[in-house]
Amino acid sequence: MLDRLLSPVQTLGKFALLLARAFSSIDEIGTYWKNFIDQMVRIGIDSIPIVALSSAFSGAVLTVQTAYQLETSFIPNSIIGSIVVPSMMLELAAVITGFILAGRVGARIAAELGTMRVSEQIDALEAMGLNSISYLILPRVLAGVIMFPVLYVAACLIGISGGVAIGHFGGFLSAQEFLDGARQFFKPFDPFFGLIKSVTFGFIITAVACYKGYFTTGGAEGVGDATTEAAVQSCVFILIADLILAMLLL
Amino acid sequence: MIQVDGLYKSFGDLDVLRDVSFEIRDGETLAIIGRSGSGKSVLMKHLIGLLQPDRGRVSVDGVDLGTVSYEELRQIRTRFGVLFQGGALFDSMTSAENVAFPLTYFADMTGEEVQNRVDECLHLVNLADVGPKKPSELSGGMRKRVALARAIALEPRYILYDEPTSGLDPETSNTIDELIRTLAQEMNVTSVVVTHDMHSVLTIADRAAFLHDSRLHWMGTVEEIHQSPDPVLDAFVKANEYHVGNPSAIPSARSTPE
Ligand SMILES: Nc1ncnc2c1ncn2[C@@H]1O[C@H](COP(=O)(O)OP(=O)(O)OP(=O)(O)O)[C@@H](O)[C@H]1O
Ligand SMILES: [Mg+2]
């Protein structure tokens, strides 16, 4: 029972130690440069297609549904743009990217590090005298924190384009109306807020996945567990962080 | 010199090592023998601080691993080359990249020098042509030898070998034994060899430590092994001889019925 109560505290402690040690050799980042570039590509560039696809569809669906909800009222069409664009920037672009990458990036990192743990590759790194946490975790978390905002911006642009396109080709409103509506209520804080979210989510996904993978125990089954837990738990943490940020900053 | 003092280690309810003390002298080759599951690999991991003792201590060159900072521990680890039981090759890299890995991080070498050293090490383990292959494309024995090449690449002062010849054919085993002996004699490497293979022990080791029932049951020079009156050690040695190259020791299983 006490164990149960203590375990979140222990987890948090272990997590803090992990991060502390990861950043303790940040001065050696030059050593880990190649890894870092590698991870930027894997986490960032390789994720662009799926992020583009999902944000284009969510922008389009949001536009169609907003148009449907406003259909019978006497509100001008341009309001559709005023609703879709902030929704994209404030919430959807960041959260959808976060969810998709929790699966794509989080699961991959947990599986990779978990396999390295159970096949003693992490022990081998340590035995050579490398800081395995800096070597493995630092580049991944940094790449996540840096690449997520980039993906967020891409998701916003593509999502809004998806909305504009479906508005135009679906005959709901013209591109001009859409953008006028967007401009009318645009607040520069909206994309800024989205960027803060995306940095946070990038950190959550990579850090949770690294933690789960690095401390994997027990063979192939352990790797499977770590992978699932990384994906599921980072989604939960994203939801919680989303709410906390909204309450703090809006 | 490595000293192990009153080391205890358990995992949950399982006492793996109890009150183990011994020392590894500079330049010697110590074999650690014992049944499967007797804690040989666990003991080996304590020597470089990959596992921490529950009680007792391990010191390397007079420095207690339990009291040093992580950065100091890393520094101490660079004196070691370690061959893990499963090889522990980095599976995202080719064999050559695996062997080059410690060199690129810890040796002051140009790319060409690294390349030459990699070729040399792979040649030493009889695998001159597997450089471009990934570990997943190699056989178990080949993987082990690539891992051995990686462990010796930096010419460390201490080399820990966890079952270097298990899973190898007798001829390759002899080559590896030969290599271990050459390194010990010519480079003055201090070696710890975990093994099941009494033949290897007799060929390469100066002394042997026998783990049994989670304790250091017996320790002595290899010459003393056969003279020891200890029944447990004797049984272990005999059982081993049934397996390797001593047919006369095999009790006749197919004795014809009277
Ligand atoms: N990380 C661990 N967690 C729990 N138990 C462990 C762990 N590592 C080893 N053990 C247990 O400790 C005991 C000794 O294991 P070890 O790997 O040292 O055996 P070994 O002597 O090397 O055997 P083998 O010759 O088969 O390699 C085994 O019973 C094993 O189950
Ligand atoms: Mg073992």
Image (cartoon, coloured by chain):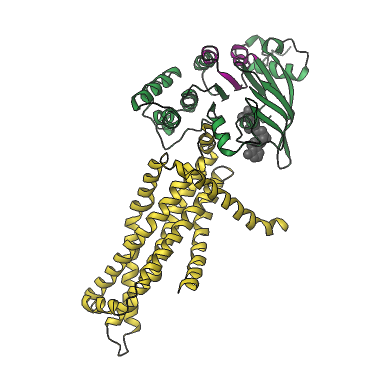
Chain colours: A yellow, B green
Query: Is B24 included in the stretch rendered in magenta?
Result: no
Image vertical order of residue B253 relative to residue B94, above or below: above
- The structure residue drawn at horizontal position 51% and vertical position 33%, both measured from the top left corner, is B88
Q: Quadrant of residue B217?
A: top right
Bounds of the magenta segment:
B181-206
Residue A224 visible somewhere in the drawing: no
Say which quadrant the C terminus of chain B sits in.
Answer: top right
Observer-nearest of B129 and B187: B187
Frontmost residue, B13 versus A78: A78
- Tell me where residue A89 appears, x and y as whole percent: 36, 69
Residue B149: x %, y % from top left: 46, 23
Question: Residue A34, how many percent across, how many down?
Answer: 38, 41
Q: Name which quarter of the figure residue B135 lies in.
A: top left
Residue B4 x %, y %:
69, 27
Task: For residue B205, say whether it is visible.
Answer: yes
* Residue B146 as seen in the image, left or right of residue B42: left
Q: Classify the position of the N terminus of chain B by image quarter.
A: top right
Left or right relative to A157: residue B89: right
**Which residue appears at 53% of the width and 50% of the height?**
A19
Ligand 2 found in image quarter: top right
Query: Viewer-proximal residue, A152 or A65?
Result: A152
Residue B182 in magenta?
Answer: yes
